[in-house]
Amino acid sequence: MAIECDVLVVGGGPAGLSAARAAAKNGLKTIVIEEDKEIGVPVQCAEAVGEYLFPYLPFEIPKEQLIWKIRGMYFWANDIAVKREGGIWSGYAINREKWDKWLANLAIGEGAEILTETALVSLEFDDDFYVDRAIAVRNDKKLEFKAKYIVGADGVNSKVIDCLGVRKRDEGLVGHVKSYEIRGIKLKYPEFEQLFLGEFAPRAYAYIFPLSQNSANIGVGTVHDKDRLDKYLEEFLEIPLVKNQLRKGRITSEKSGDAPVRDLTDRIVYGNVFLVGDAANQNIKPFIEGIIPGMVCGDILGNFLCCLMYKKQNRPEEYIDILEEKFSLIKDSQIYTDIIYGENKLPNDIYYIFVLGMMSGIFDPRRIKIDRFLERGYSSLKQFLLQEGGFIEKEI
């Protein structure tokens, strides 16, 4: 016999749990299925949250969840550096496992049910993508769910998307990150996230994200060269500025993962199926910040489903309009996508300082013309960055 519910959420991450919390709070019978054994495990991100996004949340974050203050960001590209503090560059480090468990408890507290070790297998739907049944497996036992609404919150490798058969096959949709937590280090800027660009990883980037005075998540990310991530990481660790900070460190865990940089599907609403979080490319560029944006979008979706079910005045597609009205930061940030993560004709040396200038706010992406950068040349752009607050940082 099928398990009936109003909302079936597939995926127990921040977006899915926030959607479940909001839906359950509004009286909808809500079930979350999560394929992993434990909520919050494994960790597959840098564990960063931007403080400027906190006002968008419908609830306060407990102080104990914010484990390390990040005052700003430090950008480096082939010995040219820029530091930014406050605003969109400040935030906190979190413990992602504890964070997700906190969100799970919030959802449970509002009446949602969470089933771990439960993997979606298939969806039965009509030509208009209205799902009649969802089939899952838990402990080798088949489970059938009959839900009025399906929420696909199962990340960049979404099984919901694959079951619907709507995944785009284009290149360059997903960013791949090789990441580790490392302890026992001596950070030069322990209250600043460090982001690196350069020849060590062509058209890629690397980071050092502090978790404490002497620990950090480090990683290298790329859109185009997934198979070279290990090599890029090796080259990154040989940069003197990096090597001097990490030389005595020890790796304690791996946190590698993927994140969307472009839309994985043509739409985020299909029939009675709604995509949210990474499955819906709901992160803020250029830093691919997805934890709080996913929570905000999940909360908006959970409340929208209540309106859809009880008030009968909304069409499913209106979810998109409400998202853009209440949280336009995601759409507004897409301007960075093609410039930073797409193919362009900038030579590598110009590309690195060009991206550095954009990420640090020196160059406005809305006014950028690639041809003008080509005309100015490397030396002219370097001088401009130095005049606008950049400095030379080179260690031997």
Image: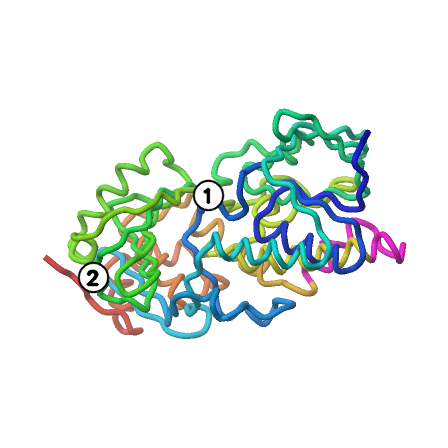
Q: Which residue is located at x 53 percent, y 69 percent?
A: 62
**How far across and down, in percent of the image, does residue 182 sit?**
28, 51
Which amino acid, by three-letter code, is at mark 2? Lys
Q: Is residue 322 magenta?
A: yes
Q: Looking at this view, is 37 or 135 the one in front?
A: 37
For marks 2 and 1, give the CA distance.
26 Å
Residue 261 left/right relative to 357: right
Q: Which residue is located at x 82 percent, y 42 percent?
A: 148
Which quadrant of the view contains residue 363? bottom left
Q: Is residue 250 above or below residue 245?
A: above
Say whether disc 2 or disc 1 marks the residue closer to the N-terminus.
1
Q: Are marks 2 and 1 in contact (CB under 8 Å)?
A: no
**How far across and down, in percent of the image, does residue 222 sit?**
38, 43
Which quadrant of the view contains residue 72? bottom left
Q: Is residue 62 magenta?
A: no
Residue 280 left/right relative to 149: left
Q: Looking at this view, is 36 or 305 the one in front?
A: 36
Q: Looking at this view, is 147 or 54 the one in front?
A: 147
Density class for disc 2 (Cα within 10 Å; few <14, some 14-19, many ≥20) is: some
Q: Looking at this view, is 363 or 220 the one in front?
A: 220
Q: Secondary structure at mark 2?
A: loop
Outermost residue to the left: 396
Question: In the rendered image, which quarter contains the N terminus?
Answer: top right
The magenta segment is 307-324
**How far across and down, in percent of the image, does residue 80 sit?**
23, 62
Task: Say which mark, if any, is on residue 186.
Answer: 2
Question: In the rendered image, which quarter contains the C terminus?
Answer: bottom left
Task: Say which mark, if any, is on residue 42.
Answer: 1
Which quadrant of the view contains residue 108? bottom right
Q: Which residue is located at x 41 percent, y 65 percent?
A: 67
Give the prevailing secondary structure in the magenta stretch.
helix
